[in-house]
Image (cartoon, rainbow, N blue to C red):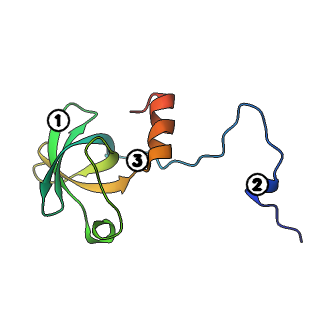
Amino acid sequence: MKFIRDRDRPEIPGQELIRVKLPRGKQMLGEIEQILGGSRFKVSCKDGNERLCRIPGKFRKRITVRVGDIVIVEPWEVEGNEKGDVVWIYNRTQMAWLRKRGYA
């Protein structure tokens, strides 16, 4: 059996090979407005609310977050309009893809 790598595939005009995770269920896209410290951020969400969001431990030490980054936010069950968790952080290429497609 021969495996085909992405760089060996024939290029199809107008088609990109970018896979981007999109929000599911009650998750939504948001943009980081302010870094507050202690792994907490002020995030402006797509539903018009501004939430105080925190990063869980699995992202905390692995990735850097800057003002203007696009993230997936999952609102809390209690105080869902004010607080939430950052579930996913997009890189620069993925943010450009989201903006190009009109998601962000």
The vertical placement of 30 against 91, above or below, is: above
Q: Which residue carries the number 2 mark?
A: 7
Relative vertical location of residue 74 with respect to residue 31 in this rendering, above or below: below
Mark 1 / mark 3, whichever is N-terminal: 3
Q: Is residue 59 visible?
A: yes
In front: 73, or 79?
A: 73
Tag 2–tag 1 contact (CB < 8 Å): no
Q: Which label's residue is closer to the chain start, 2 or 1? A: 2
The quadrant in which residue 13 appears is top right
Q: Is residue 103 left or right of residue 31?
A: right
Q: How many other residues sit within 10 Å of disc 3, few (<14), some (14-19) or many (≥20)?
A: few
The amino acid type found where label 1 is placed reads Asn
Q: Quadrant of the N terminus?
A: bottom right
Looking at the image, tell me whether mark 2 or mark 3 is earlier in sequence order: 2
Q: Badges 1 and 3: C-beta atoms under 8 Å apart?
A: no
Instruction: Please name which of the two marks, 2 or 3, marks the residue nearer to the observer.
Output: 2
**Which quadrant of the rendered structure holds the C terminus?**
top left
Q: For the residues marked 2 and 3, what is the alpha-carbon distance in whole angstroms?
A: 30 Å
| Marks 2 and 3 in Cβ contact (< 8 Å) | no
Residue under circle 3? 24
